[in-house]
Amino acid sequence: MQILAIETSCDETAAAVIEKNGHNIKILSNVVASQIEIHKKFGGVFPEHASRAHVEKIIPVVEEALRQGLDKRVKGKAKNYFTLNTSPDTLVNNIDYIAVTTGHGLIGSLLIGVNFAKTLAYAKNIPIIGINHWLGHIYSNFTSHSEPAEESVANATTGIRQRSFASTQDDNLPQFPALVLIVSGGHTGLVLMKSHNEIIPLGETLDDAAGEAFDKVAKLLDLGYPGGPAISKAAENMDHSQNTNGRSHFEKIDISLPRPMIDSKDYNFSFSGLKTAVLYKAKQLNLTCSTPPLEWGIRFALAAEFQQAVIDILVAKTIKAAYEFKPKSICLCGGVSANKELREQLKKAVQKLPWKTSYHIPPMDLTGDNAAMIGLAAAYHLDQKTTYDKISADSNLKL
Ligand code: KG4
Ligand code: ZN
């Protein structure tokens, strides 16, 4: 059974083909067209440009995902059996379900994917499943941890990147109850997953999401776009910069930042004050007008301290929830789960728990927005299939 999954909730146009064969669920293809270059000059996602780019990319991305996915299925045939000349009709005829992200996200972006999926479902009479974007991120952990079988190769002309392939193996999958920490650009929260159909939100951010804070702090420290990878790179650079400038410069400067709500009794988060604390610290250190190299060293140190503050809060809240709910598995997901320090530090904290808990992180290619995770979520919720007329986009959709 093949599922065509489509994701356009923010700034990635993505399509994937998932194969479900009993309990065996495989990612056959996972194609993402990123819009980073478009939004870079604005220092953030520009919604109108995002939806226009989705309009341009949706057809080539879906066709590419179908072609790659079907090629994977054709055993004994030459590679690239389904060529550019294969008609879209032939490609779509192999699809049993369509899955599409219906929310949360930018409405102009969501509408492109949702209307494309609905049109295809109507024209081809294929059942459709609407998937919540956060549910998709959760299911990025419902794959095996095998590294990409095929290298990610960006196509120079289309900018389309071919992503990883992975198949599920039961012993690698999270066990219920599972505690899931979702950390992305639009959402940060902890959920308890008692089963595939019982997902209980424990807490969420009261203001900025963790990824949003990474993006804003990177912008105010002028570290580059997108902010998350820029901050983690800057944090890594700090060591190097300390060596070249001499540690003593930093030892005299107080760059310590607060850890908002780290000890609060609930499972909510707040990152807006932390971002403001970086702003005040930067002003106090007068970063804006002096020149490198020392100044960049301080920026790197501030970035590292900010990253550590976010990690401390995320890890503390997750471990607190673990003690209360005693999960069999702890999972990390969302764009910020690409952060190596977070992956490592949460792993160490989970390993210290006094009972056996498995730890799950998505393969790197499934951390940011992608359609494979939407298809994986759909593969576990096929009973939610419906018809095209019952599906609509909801920019504020909750879990
Ligand atoms: O899940 P995602 O791709 O989109 C949303 O659903 O929001 O998350 C994007 C977020 C961005 O804020 C980006 O800066 C952050 O994930 N991110 C990172 C890293 N890579 C991406 N944050 C911290 N460290 C990273 N290495
Ligand atoms: Zn996302």
Image (cartoon, rainbow, N blue to C red):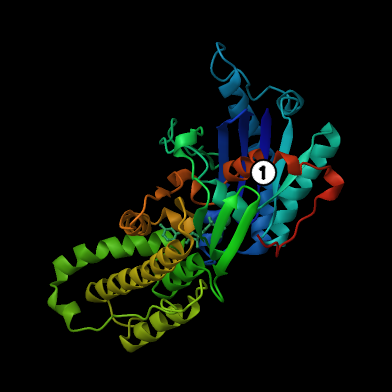
Residue assigned mark 1: 6
Label 1 Cα neighbours within 10 Å, binned few <14 / some 14-19 / many ≥20:
many
Please report the residue visible at 40 percent of the width from the left and 47 percent of the height from the top: 358
> Which amino acid, by three-letter code, is at mark 1?
Ile
Tell me: residue 24, above or below residue 393: above
Q: Residue at the far bottom: name it.
A: 284
Screen quadrant of the C terminus? bottom right
Tell me: residue 206, above or below residue 109: below
Determine whether, in the image, residue 90 is placed left or right of residue 226.
right
Please report the residue visible at 20 percent of the width from the left and 62 percent of the height from the top: 240
Residue 163 shows up from this direction:
yes
Determine whether, in the image, residue 73 is placed left or right of residue 230.
right
Q: Residue at the far top: name it.
A: 76
Residue 81's spot in the image, x, y percent?
Answer: 60, 17
Residue 334 shows up from this direction:
no
Disc 1 secondary structure class: strand
Screen quadrant of the N terminus? top right
Please report the residue visible at 74 percent of the width from the left and 30 percent of the height from the top: 96
To which quarter of the image does residue 230 belong? Answer: bottom left
Tell me: residue 332, above or below residue 278: above
Determine whether, in the image, residue 62 is placed left or right of residue 33.
right
Residue 197's spot in the image, x, y percent?
Answer: 66, 50
Residue 384's spot in the image, x, y percent?
Answer: 75, 44
